Image (cartoon, rainbow, N blue to C red):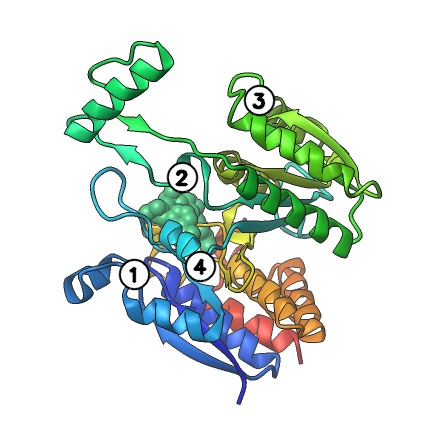
Amino acid sequence: MGYPVTLIRGDGIGPEVTEATRFVIDATGVSIDWHVVDAGGDRIEQDGTPLPEAVRDSIRKTKIALKGPIATPIGNGFRSVNVELRKTFDLYASLRPIESIPGVRSYFHDIDLIIVRENTEDLYAGIEFERTTHEAAEAREFLSRLSGKAIREDSAIGVKPISVLGSRKIVEFAFKRAIALGRKKITAIHKANIMKFTDGLFLEIAREVAKEYPQIEFEDRIVDNMCMQLVQKPELYDVLVMPNLYGDILSDLCAGMIGGLGVAPGANIGQEYAVFEAIHGSAPDIAGQNKANPTAMILSGVMMLEHLGEMEAARQLRAAVLRVIAAKKSVTEDLGPIDEPASTTAMAEAIAQAML
Ligand code: NAI
């Protein structure tokens, strides 16, 4: 029996990149007992929900999932499956290594950052009221009375909860990871000058936690300044820890610095469960064409192998990915310009070959 792992194929390019990942992980020789389940918009008709109980049950059993991207319609529609999964399994930490890959076109070189993003709170907590509802009217009236500030009648309302516990957990996670990975410095990112009680709390807790880890240098940056600094002097930074919204935005910014979403892996980690998934979405514009870059998903698979303690297989698989990309043959068209771009499947086959 291999390691039990839930495989959620996802929407759009999800089935293509997860299949490629499953193929190369199997090629490492590590035995995985894949439990394949489906979530997303297509399940609503049959199950009445985009996140069927079978998916939750499977993760409860396996504790680990490899997940393809799932589309979230903007505006009306169902709540994000991604957000639901993070809340259900308290996957409070999003871990995103941002490392330059030789051979991938980018304006930046030698980028080596780790983004640690809080995953359950902040404006992504899902506490929102639609403009025309009576809940929104009540929220406007209540908040206006509490704060002494007028809120326009035609406003929708969103809430930004930031807790002591949530902030402490994510900052401690960042410090522990930094130590485990031999990193030197942590930068906490916030907008505490404007959001004094929410981001201010996050910063206060980060400073408190930092005192418990004197071996790691600690500093903080305001998020807008951080964006500029990252593109001007990325070499000054090491591990970045931040609340949910800034983490989402900075992850894409930093993914762009290493050549785009096609190569940026990620993991959502909690006390008991872990879900590995690329940063990118379901890319509906290229879905079903067998041309999505599987690298980000495969590197998320590498993180999963590390999580399982299969360090040698993880090292081999990562080395094979780098070899194939450096050779500039058998790579997908987004890694171009390439005379003859490879399909998703062909790139996965080349990676499996490169491990032999
Ligand atoms: P996206 O990441 O799907 O696509 C942005 C651009 O990057 C597109 O041009 C796409 O073709 C390209 N791209 C993304 N991944 C690629 C890959 N592996 N290879 C080659 N090109 C790639 O972002 P978008 O368009 O904003 O979102 C589409 C859907 O995905 C939305 O419904 C969104 O909610 C969902 N989404 C899901 C996520 C998840 O499941 N964790 C994360 C982000 C978005």
For badge 2, the amino acid type reads Tyr
Q: Is residue 216 above or below residue 291?
A: above
Return the residue found at the far bottom.
1
State the separation of the CA atoms marked 1 and 4.
13 Å
Q: In the rendered image, which quarter is residue 43 located in?
A: bottom left
Left/right of residue 18 with respect to residue 73 in the rendered view: right
Local packing at callout 4 (Cα closer than 10 Å; few below 14, some 14-19, many 20+) is many
> Given contact means CB atoms under 8 Å apart, are the residues at marks 4 and 3 in contact?
no
For badge 1, the amino acid type reads Leu
State the separation of the CA atoms marked 1 and 3.
35 Å
Indicate which disc residue 192 carries: 3
Question: Where is mark 1, residue-wise?
Answer: 51
Question: Where is mark 4, residue-wise?
Answer: 89
Q: Earlier in the sequence, mark 1 or mark 4?
A: 1
Mark 4 or 2, closer to the camera: 4
Indicate which disc residue 124 carries: 2
